[in-house]
Amino acid sequence: MSNTILSLLSRERLDEHYRSGFWRHDTIYSLLMQHASRSPDHFALRDRTRRLTYRGLLTAVDAFAADLAGRGERLGERVSVWLPSSIETAVALLACSRNGYVCCPSLHRENTVAEVSALLERTRSAALLARPGYGADADQQDIFSMARRLPFVRHVYRLEAGQRLELDVGGRQAAPPSEDPDRVIYLAFTSGTTGVPKGVMHSDNTLLANARAVAADWRLGAHSVIYSLSPLSHNLGIGALVTAMAIGAELVVHDLPTGESLLDRLLETCATYLVGVPTHAIDLLSELRARSFPAALAVKGFRISGAAVAGEVIAELMRHGIVPQSGYGMTETCSHQYTLPEDDPRRIVETVGRCCSGFEIKIWREDEPDIEAPPGEIGQIGSRGASLMLGYFDNQIATEQAFNRHGWLMTGDLGCVDDEGYLRLCGRLKDVINRGGRKIYPAPIEALALCHPAVERAAAFPVKDGRLGEKVCLAVVYRHSVAPGGKAILAHLNTAGLSKFDMPEYLLELDQMKLTPTGKVIKRDLVEGVQQARLCPVPVRWRGDD
């Protein structure tokens, strides 16, 4: 075992997880090779335009790996991917597993070109795979010209809409595949309360440990068709991909254009297990109701993460024969917590299940994370296990600060565990806004709003929404009673560089806000004021042509 990146990997951790069997000697790529050898014509990946067998997928992965190697990509270097959900993202991850590169696919549709360029600089990515016109401001900025100006980027792969990654490597082959499943091969960017992205590092083993557990507990196998409603730029989507590769199943990529029928797509693909967020479940149920759909679907399980699921949504899914999997996890820990198919519906509604094999959580005091909370008491959730990250990329301080002195990752979430080990989430220490599974950070919105000459004070906070869970409300206090109005505020935020996907959808204009003694806005008062109808925000919507 060798590693070119500073990480949390240690001899003690290696011994513990190999001894327990949760870590093995397989890489994700070596599992692909095994499936291609045993069942070459079994389907592996599918999107709207093509369906690859395991033999076809292996051929595509080997070609991309050879092309990267031929362009000088070296062990441990980063390959960034900025694409909508596509087979190419899966090919990139598997090629990185093969050659010992690090795949960075968590560049999202909501990102701006400047944000992606900054991440390329932070990771010093040697290659970029991207699509023209993709991203929050692709109609105004060009990632390709910007990436080519970065001295460390050796090659940029430009994929037009509908174009496939078809490479003529002229018989060239990469070096023999890496046999080290403990090397960092996946780098996913997440953010903290400040909104500054942190790169979460995972190995083949940390990803596969969770994938194997989910597959065993939900009885998934080579017969399964896993449909990821979450994009492959998100950790949920990558988890679905790795699960499929672990068991030799087929993964269906969700690449439907807006307005096309999800129900028809599920029927066409014979999907048996879905992965997504509550918004996806709500949209599927809306279509089922609108079409008065009487038949049973092949879908038997639905992993729903990212936000709490309403009881009526769970009940309605079960009436259609779909068992929801209520779960909890983080990019840092994978999807380690979930309910089981045989669990009582009440457990699915009220809890996020129990830890999977190879993982454990413990509740620590909210005010003192080094002291364990008494049984049944609400506290901060700490976690550790085989699917725990290998640290934050190039950020030793953040890695150290993420753990308590006993070696448990402090999640920043609050919860309590009942006598049977089921976890109940009770809130968040951080005031992140969760819009349909997308985390929106208030601080950047507030900072940009305060740059408006008429704004004296600004606070972004969540307003409950029946479909998306939460939406952003921006509360403002104007200077000298000058009220530019919602249209002008949104135009200012756009000009200042706020992603259109982070735009406030409510505006609350106030004469004053309650403050702490140190001058911080008491956001709890704003949230409760809206809930109690004491405060009445006005809906606003950013339109680019305004």
Image: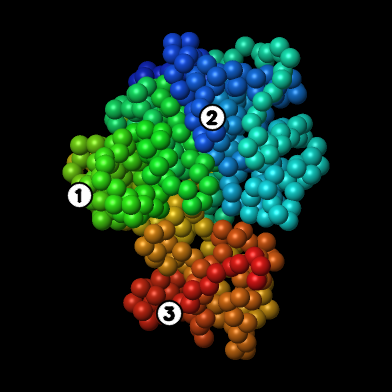
The reply to whether discs 2 and 3 touch (Cβ–Cβ < 8 Å) is no
Please determine whether, in this image, residue 307 is positioned above or below residue 186.
below
Q: Residue at x 26, y 56 (%)?
A: 312
The one of 477 and 232 positioned closer to us in this rendering = 232
Q: What's the distance in space between the residues labelled 3 and 1, CA to CA?
A: 34 Å
Of helix, strand and loop, which one carries label 2?
loop
Neighbour tally class for label 2: few under 14, some 14-19, many 20 plus, Cα within 10 Å: few
Q: Amino acid at mark 3?
A: Cys
Q: Amino acid at mark 2?
A: Arg
Which residue is label 3 attached to? 536
Q: What's the distance in space between the residues labelled 2 and 3, CA to CA?
A: 49 Å
The one of 394 and 102 positioned closer to us in this rendering = 102
Q: What's the distance in space between the residues labelled 1 and 2, CA to CA?
A: 40 Å
Which residue is label 1 attached to? 346
Of helix, strand and loop, which one carries label 1?
helix
Quarter containing the C terminus: bottom right
Q: Is residue 501 left or right of residue 406?
A: right
Which badge, 2 or 3, comes first in the chain's sequence? 2
Q: Which mark is residue 110?
A: none
Q: Is residue 38 left or right of residue 103?
A: left
Point out residue 484 in the picture as x, y percentages from the top left corner: 63, 82
Q: Residue at x 67, y 15 (%)?
A: 174
Which residue is label 2 attached to? 50
Q: Residue at x 59, y 17 (%)?
A: 59
Point out residue 212 in the picture as x, y percentages from the top left corner: 37, 26
Please determine whether, in this image, residue 479 is positioned above or below residue 520.
below
